[in-house]
Image (cartoon, grey):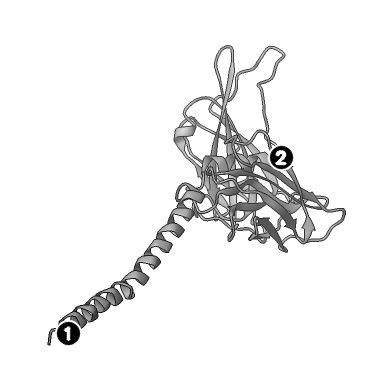
Amino acid sequence: MKRLVPLTIVMLCALVIGLGCGDDETTTITQYDTLIQTVTVTDSFTDTVSSPLVVTRAFAGIGETFGFWAFAHQTTQRVVSLDSVFAADSVCSIDPWFDGVPTWGQNYHLDYYDAGPRFAPGDTAEIRLYAEGTLSTAHVKLLSLSDDITVVEAATPDSVGVDDPIEAHWNPMEHVDWYGVVVTRYLASDMFDFWDYFHYFSYDTTVTIPADLIDENGRLSIVVFAVTGPSPSDQEENVTGGLVGGSIYSQSGIGGFEVKIGAGMPMRAGKSAATLEPETIEILDRLLESHPTER
């Protein structure tokens, strides 16, 4: 009987040790691995932004040839190296962008211009961005910069009274997702001319410019253009997958008209009022900047 007591103690110790080395230890290791993985992911991206490298001011379209151009900049301190970019299976140039904000990390200017006509309006171009073994893609329905919007003059006034809204109309264009409108308002004092910009978009072929923009004598310069890609209200991006995000757009040419407000601009002694008409792509860039994507 005395011999059984030590034996029993040994067996109990073995049982305790066995339980301690069983499922509990395995669970502890799994939790530890999961914790390390979570810390690694969090530390890599430094915040909740899913795309540490983002393309902005990105356009693909048809001019005399097919073209693609974009800027890419860091959104977090997770530095991403862009390996290669293809626009419709053609290699794009990747150049440092030293004016990028923020200044840390990698910032790039991307572009490609084809030597001949490869696409027609309505065709789709695929943009592929490779970064550190990952692939991000966008599919862009192309518009032609030589196709201008035509304003319906009979339905759009060329002059309005102060405090009167303006309803602008234009003819529809094929393959369009939405229309952008940039309004330049010119006002005048005794010595200086002033201008400022207002940005609208429409899924239809009309837009109403509110009366509170038309509260003084002056004039409005209005340009309308067609766009494919995410609208400012979508807050979605069409570059998906991998480490690169953002949106790529295509744009038509523009249609423009002017509206006199009240008495219009005063006459200058041999000097006309200043006019600063934006470049074609610049007007879309201004509109997108005025409706930033919430990242």
Q: Residue furthest front?
A: 2
Location of residue 199 by image quarter: top right
Indicate the amino acid at tag 2.
Answer: Pro
Mark found first going from the N terminus, 1 or 2: 1
Placement of the N terminus among the 4 image quadrants:
bottom left
> Which residue is at the front of the view, 167 or 274?
274
Q: Which residue lies furthest to the left in this view?
A: 1
Location of residue 9 by image quarter: bottom left
Indicate the amino acid at tag 1.
Answer: Arg
Side (left or right) of 282 relative to 214: right
Side (left or right) of 195 relative to 250: left
Q: Could you say whether the residue bearing mark 2 is in a helix, strand or loop?
A: strand
Q: Residues within 10 Å of mark 2 (few under 14, many from 20)?
A: few
Side (left or right) of 46 relative to 256: left
- Residue that badge 1 annotates: 3
| Image point (69%, 59%), residue name | 128
Image position, residue 19 (x, y; %): 28, 76
| Image point (30%, 77%), residue name | 18
| Image point (48%, 33%), residue name | 213
- Residue that badge 2 annotates: 96
